[in-house]
Amino acid sequence: MSKSETIIQINDLYFEYSPYIDEGENNNSVIESVPVLHGVSLDVPEGQFVAILGHNGSGKSTLAKHLNGILTPTRGSVTVAGIDVSDDEKLQQLRRTVGMVFQNPDNQIVATIVEEDVAFALENLGVEPAEIRVRIDAALETVGMAKFAKHAPHSLSGGQKQRVAIAGVIAMEPKCIVLDEPTAMLDPSGRAEVVRTVKKLNVQGATVVYITHYMEEAALADRVVVMDDGKVIMDGTPREVFRRVGELREVGLDVPQVTELAHKLRAAGVAIPDDVIGEEEFAEWIVKIVGAERI
Amino acid sequence: MTTKSIETLNLSYKYSVGTPFEVTAVDNVNFDVNEGEFVGIIGHTGSGKSTLMQHLNGLLKQTCGEVWINGRNIRGKGVNIRDVRFEVGLVFQYSEHQLFEETVFKDIAFGPRNMGLRDVQIKERVLRAAASMGVHDSWLQRSPFDLSGGQKRRVALAGVIAMEPGILILDEPAAGLDPRGRDKVLGFINEYHKSKRLTVILVSHSMEDIVKYADRVLVMNKGGVFCYDTTDKVFARTGEITEIGLGVPQITRLSERLRDMGVDLGCDVYTVERAAERILEVMGKSSESV
């Protein structure tokens, strides 16, 4: 793969929160800096769908916040589409390149009408009104919310609100979309709506960095990166990562139920591969094995 | 005869009565919970489950119908609604957002103090509640805002438990936590339920969590009771549950798929352990090793 195809380059990234003074009752003690990331290196090719897993406090959100310059490296470097995130002068360009979606839809919606919310960033960027119209319509169409364009956001469900937030991001036509637990506050149908939308954006060419605690969602990605204690401890396809059931448990994570079942059956002597992650392929394996036993 | 902890009779609640925006959020609900039972409640967003829960300690007043707690009509004569609130502990979603005190100790003590207990009793209750939710002694004098999300959640739970309610209602207690945080919170709740034999209602979107802990499951749809039965019987109705927009555990979907392909594991497969046992049985192997 040539260098030009890599869109995100994270090079030996260290990050620590600055020292601060704790104003206690008697003593103003200096709290030492808090290290969060310890030498993270990661290259993401353009168009890839990367899921990031890790328990709370493992550093995954801190990593995500480097991708559009909300945080900048203490040491090491992060570049996205050739833009160094530490370069203040290129911050606006960076923010157009990398769109962020956060956990709580209610914190991301600013306007009182859906389409005005989607237009918010475009107006700030000084995009021509005619062009804004075109982009809003296209973005709402993509996330399946076109018929709610004139609705008030508070009348929408969580999944719908989150899709409006995503529309606001894609209206800026970013190359890369970073989503930090976008489904954590949603019910199962809302989660499915958001996951479908993200998958669609990826198919249309966007590079996606997707942080989640749901293993079934991560199983849909091209690549799974597992973080623990500010480091990348696993990096591979969902199959390669989820087969490491024991190690994942040790860092406080789950595996999809199907993978867990395959592991239990293997332990009981059933010849099923240890890297099964989908329901369909699992079912086919069982039918094959049971069929063989019956004959 | 077992005592009923909770009983609702033809309970209905309408928002914005008398305006064009009138909505029936809870529609003629009849359900009961036995003393010491662990009941799970599922339903998609807007199905009325949170509205129903807020009736059980009198936060909302029904449009019609009755709520009975421990054999008393909570809107009946001579019943002080304040006492009902101490008897029925309600833990909201994202309960850690309600932490406000300077220290963890003071936060947990807030409820017992409102009950008018003496300092020494308050202290006992705080320590007991903290221990039952895995809130470490060394945290008690710290600010609750120094703790992690899962730890804060447990402090908020301890604050409700410190009032020692006989009925505990939890609205999505594990939402937004990572797998380890989730298992800890639900694990402590389950232990507490067992040791005190108190009545617990767990509202959750996660079928996996419900099947792990609940004796019976109430499925809400459009403000009404869609079904209310033992966990086995409810999850045997996978097709209908999926139709009303609820997810079933991945393992249950898998078992449905296998049945369609000619491998029948039974209609009551919703844990990985049971699926493993049944598959081994079908293969004619002993399931002891699982």
Image (spheres, coloured by chain):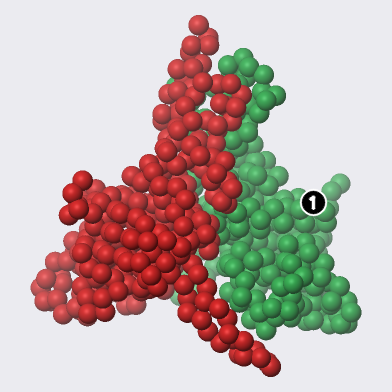
Chain colours: A red, B green
Whether residue A187 is situated above or below residue A133 in the rendered picture: above
Instruction: Tell me which residue sits at (55%, 21%) in the image.
Output: A270
Dividing the picture into quadrants, the one containing residue A144 is bottom left
Could you tell me residue B28's position as x and y percent? 60, 57
Instruction: Tell me which residue sits at (72%, 56%) in the image.
Output: B188
Relative depth, front residue between B99 and B83: B99
Instruction: Tell me which residue sits at (11%, 71%) in the image.
Output: A131
Could you tell me residue B50's position as x and y percent? 58, 63
Q: Image quadrant for the C terminus of chain B?
A: top right
Q: Is residue A150 left or right of residue B263?
A: left
Relative depth, front residue between B247 and B57: B247
Q: Residues within 10 Å of mark 1 (few under 14, many from 20)?
A: some
Instruction: Tell me which residue sits at (53%, 9%) in the image.
Output: A294
Whether residue A26 is situated above or below residue B128 in the rendered picture: below
Disc 1 on helix, strand or loop?
helix
The residue type indicated by label 1 comes to Lys
Q: Which residue is mark 1?
A: B194
The answer to whether residue B36 of the structure is visible from this angle is no
Could you tell me residue B8's position as x and y percent? 70, 58
